[in-house]
Image (cartoon, grey):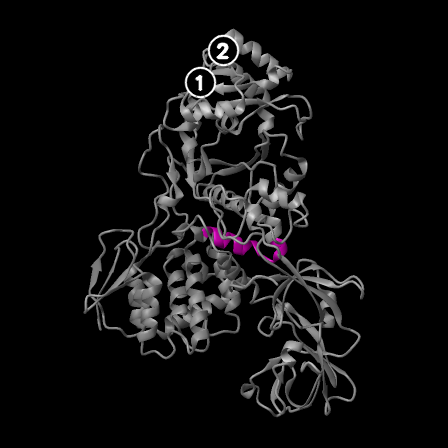
Amino acid sequence: MEIKSVAFPAETPPLSVIAAAKVAGIPPLPIATSASPDSAPSFHFSNGLKLQGTYVLLRYIGRIASIPHFYGQNAYESGQIDEWLEYAPVLSSGSAFETACKYVDSYLEGRTFLVGNFLSIADIAIWSGLAGTGLRWESLRKSKKFQNLVRWFNSVLAEYSDALTEVLATYVGKRGLGKPVPVKSKEHQSVSQPTKSVNGDISKAGSKPTFEVDLPDAEIGKVKLRFAPEPSGYLHIGHSKAGLLNQYFAQRYQGQVIVRFDDTNPAKESNEFVDNILKDIETLGIKHETVTFTSDYFPQLMEMAENLIRQGKAYVDDTPREEMQKERMDGIESKCRNNSVQENLKLWKEMIAGSERGLQCCVRGKLDMQDPNKSLRDPVYYRCNPIPHHRIGSKYKIYPTYDFACPFVDSIEGITHALRSSEYHDRNAQYYRIQEDMGLRKVFLYEFSRLNMVYTLLSKRKLLWFVQNGKVDGWDDPRFPTVQGIVRRGLKIEALIQFILEQGASKNLNLMEWDKLWTINKKIIDPVCPRHTAVIEERRVLLTLTNGPEKPFVRIIPRHKKYEGAGEKATTFTRRIWLDYADAGLIAADEEVTLMDWGNAIIKGIEKDREGKVTQLTGVLHPEGSVKTTKLKLTWLPETNELVNLSLVEFDYLITKKKLEEGEDFLDVLNPCTKKETAALGDSNIRNLKRGEILQLERKGYFRCDMPYVRPSKPVVLFAIPDGRQQTGLK
């Protein structure tokens, strides 16, 4: 079965596929230009079959190429290559480009190729990603910023000069791969429907994951955006997308972002949440011009509401809430809708006073009770609420709704484009109608898809339930999807930014897997985090090496064999060493094993208790033994009083269902076991860990130090960091 032709959109050639085919020596293929600019690149075979998708084609080339190990020497290397193929699109992710370059540069320190000892399709994918950005990469290449990356890039180019130079000359212009994205939208959108969805504009199958889309009628230097969280909880991963997307567009159009607290509901809000949201914004690196509050505009909002009442565009209604909801659903006008202006103003004053009569009322906009869009059926503008406000105290007894305040404050503050998630889509018409009735300047709405995660609740009301009922330790609990929670669990903000920017190309923005985020995180922490050793305390087994050192001695070894910046650690070598019980149970009599960072040993004696469980081992060091021949590579600790008590903490999801259906109660799917603590012993160097430091415990995984060493009796607390591999629940 031979490849008959290759097809791809003329404006977005799959550079990595073309380069891989050239390097692999596949004969030149006829090119069929795809009719649709969004279609995925594809191979068409002589028997009529077809394969499509950039990385599908790359893997196919990897399997048929005559180049040795082009898709890895074994299944593990193929898996590593797949990880790099998943990572490659980050190089095209706008503001994440230099972060990605920094990561790959660090990874390549001391390496010739990305995977193993041979050129692979992983190298071609990353190389093509860099080359495809044109001048952006060339300017970095000429600088001394990423020396390892430049060395590697030049080495690949020199080795396969003929093939790669031809590809560059044919497909990469001065500005980069394909046509440059215009800065200003060519299409003028009407005021009646000036919304544009990130979902619809971000590339579809086969193109690059990026937010390279246009804000309608945006002009360089004149764009003003707002990130407007409600101070009713800490920021979570969903809010992060909104905040980072605002920052992305502000940078792209050389505009500005303001942070505005939407503080119109005193029953839910507090200064604690304000302070922590500001902390989260700083953690995310969101640059903002100023901080404002909707409550700053309460006097103007009250004045506007009264003006609308006087103009007959709003009225005061005392219909009970449930009855009002039913009337809105059925399109039935309220009995109060046609009250006189004088009657409305009289009741408005009762509301302002917070009187018993006023507490029965609300202000509603007089829009259209028969409109098919139910958000236009006379929405509520103002409600009474006698609860003191966290900033203003008891000055007001009435508060505007979000639907009323948002279009007013957006316009007054000079916002040009208001970004909000597509869950508000049905209320866009309401937003514009309210601005029209107010006589205010129009603000463009720009929709983006809400970020939802599997097994995760993002409702602040539901998260508050866990806090109030003691199911978690607070809003920064590592089981929470809050910024503080996931950072405390060991997530690097760079990983979160990359993950969110990558969502531009995802077909399934509504429900994302955590595994992908943790896989990105692993790629960032693994090249630099120090290595340490731990042994599980329960049933640990003593191995006596009969020819071991008479007196303990210490060697200074690197904390990370491939990264000098991790520093050094002291390792003590003794005749008696501790092994994990799980490891001891795998050893057979007379088996040769490798003791990591020491050498080989032959196990001569195995003692067991009545239940057949290993209790003690004896053996001899065998320094001339080959590490390559042993099946078991074991971590160990010396028997000394210098070992550090550890508590290794693992976490699981708070709920047991990937996605709650509409109307389903989260209380019905609570996970009964979400936290597991395991006592362990660690090497003496763990005393020096600082809170927040990330490390790898050899053969146990990655951890973040949540509570550093204080005294021998108080264990160092290490939180397990997921590495992106699917794990079973805790037991």
Q: Nearer the viewer, mark 2 or mark 1?
A: 1
User: How packed is label 2: few (under 14 Cα within 10 Å), some, or many (20 or more)?
Assistant: some
Q: Is residue 530 left or right of residue 499?
A: right
> Can residue 663 be found in the magenta stretch?
no
Quarter holding residue 171: bottom left
- Along the line of sight, the residue nearer the viewer: 268 or 302: 268
Residue 709 location, quadrant:
bottom right
The front one of 340 and 197 is 340
Residue sitting at 67 percent across and 43 percent down? 468
Residue 150 visible within the image: yes
The CA span between labels 2 and 1 is 12 Å
Q: Which residues are magenta?
A: 487-501
In the image, which disc is placed on residue 366? 1
Q: Disc 1 marks which amino acid?
A: Lys
Q: Badge 1: few (under 14), some or many (20 or more) residues near its Cα, within 10 Å?
A: many
Q: Are marks 2 and 1 in contact (CB under 8 Å)?
A: no
Q: For numbered disc 2, what is the local secondary structure?
A: helix
Question: Which residue is drawn at the image coordinates 40% and 36% (left, top)?
Answer: 219
Which of the two discs, 2 and 1, labels the residue nearer the N terminus?
A: 2
Q: Is residue 722 left or right of residue 511?
A: right
Estimate the x, y position of residue 253 in percent, counting from the top left. 44, 41
The picture places residue 196, in percent across and down from the top left corner, at: 37, 38
Residue type marked 2: Arg
Q: In the figure, is residue 30 to the left or right of 728?
A: left
Q: Height in image: 271 above or below 199?
A: above
- Residue 106, x across and y down, in percent: 53, 66
Mark carried by residue 310: 2
Give the answer, above or below, for where 584 lies relative to 42: below
Q: Is residue 442 visible?
A: no
